[in-house]
Image (cartoon, rainbow, N blue to C red):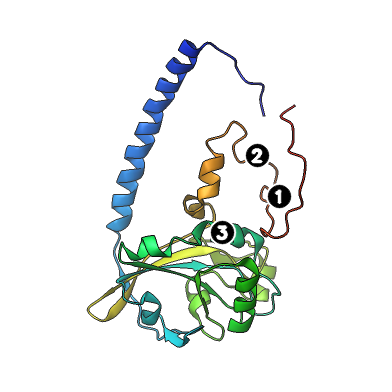
């Protein structure tokens, strides 16, 4: 962290008001972007995807429950993985407990992974989450929404992720997809990946308010993240 610029209260207030103008500009731009996102066209989902859930076999339409909107977080937990991705777990920690609030805005939230349901539920119990979580094991769902790849695709460093052909280091990737249900049909309305997922992580937004910010640097800037039951107690680092 850079050495702080220590000033008087009056100088601080002037700087804060100047920055507030920029924050208000950003808020207006974000509101405009959200309006544009809501106005994106829809695509009808015709493929009959099926999932394993704690309540039994379920279709994509079933994941909506009584709601007309569904948010799916593509959680990285592959068919042979013994535990879920630590970064996806960081995001899921931010989601746990919000389902009741989303429900009052006609929206369901579900995690979806390719791992078998038994492994998903075991990891869910370990994490203590209440989140709805479905297994897409054996279906094309993850492939069709560009968050699962073959070993050959990973090796070739040419796979379709985040709307471009690029490399990715493993066969599972994170993302979020949004669906709507109308007149008995399901429609895909939005998907985002990579840094587009930052907006879903409340802990990052809180850290962005602090002098150190996210305190991340280097090519593996999330190397500090652990599953929440794997952090070791450490003496807080000095800013010096």
In the image, what residue occupies the spot 60% across and 77% down?
Answer: 120
Quadrant in which the N terminus is drawn: top right
In the image, what residue occupies the spot 35% across and 82% down?
Answer: 46
Dot 1 or dot 3, earlier in sequence: 3
Label 1 or label 3, whichever lies nearer to me, is 3
In the image, what residue occupies the spot 61% across and 65% down?
Answer: 158
Q: Which of the 4 image quarters holds residue 43?
A: bottom left
State the separation of the CA atoms marked 1 and 2. 10 Å
Q: Tell which residue pokes out farthest to the bottom in this image.
A: 57
The location of residue 219, given as percent across then percent down, is: 69, 47
State the separation of the CA atoms marked 1 and 3. 16 Å
State the separation of the CA atoms marked 3 and 2. 19 Å
The location of residue 73, given as percent across then percent down, is: 49, 66
Per the image, the residue denoted by label 1 is 224
State if disc 2 and disc 1 touch (CB < 8 Å). yes
Per the image, the residue denoted by label 3 is 93
Q: Is residue 111 above or below residue 205?
A: below
Name the foreground residue: 9 vs 155: 9
Q: Which of the 4 image quarters holds residue 14?
A: top left
């Amino acid at each position: 962290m850079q050495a702080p610029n220590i000033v008087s209260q009056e100088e601080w207030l002037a700087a804060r008001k100047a920055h507030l103008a920029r924050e208000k500009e950003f808020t207006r731009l974000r509101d405009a972007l959200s309006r544009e996102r809501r106005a994106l066209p829809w695509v009808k989902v015709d493929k009959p995807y099926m999932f394993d859930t704690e309540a039994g076999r379920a279709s994509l339409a079933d994941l909506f429950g009584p709601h007309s909107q569904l948010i799916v977080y593509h959680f990285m937990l592959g068919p042979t993985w013994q535990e879920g991705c630590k970064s996806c777990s960081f995001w899921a920690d931010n989601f746990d407990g919000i389902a009741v609030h989303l429900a009052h805005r006609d929206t369901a939230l579900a995690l979806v992974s390719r791992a078998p349901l038994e492994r998903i539920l075991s990891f869910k119990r370990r994490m203590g989450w209440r989140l709805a979580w479905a297994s897409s094991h054996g279906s094309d769902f993850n492939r069709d929404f560009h968050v699962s790849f073959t070993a050959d695709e990973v090796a070739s460093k040419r796979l379709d992720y985040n709307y471009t052909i690029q490399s990715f280091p493993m066969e599972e990737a994170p993302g979020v997809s949004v669906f709507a249900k109308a007149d008995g049909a399901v429609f895909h309305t939005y998907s985002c990946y990579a840094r587009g997922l930052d907006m879903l992580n409340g802990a990052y937004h809180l850290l962005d308010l602090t002098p150190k910010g996210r305190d991340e640097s280097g090519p593996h800037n999330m190397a500090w993240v652990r599953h929440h039951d794997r952090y070791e107690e450490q003496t807080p680092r000095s800013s010096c």
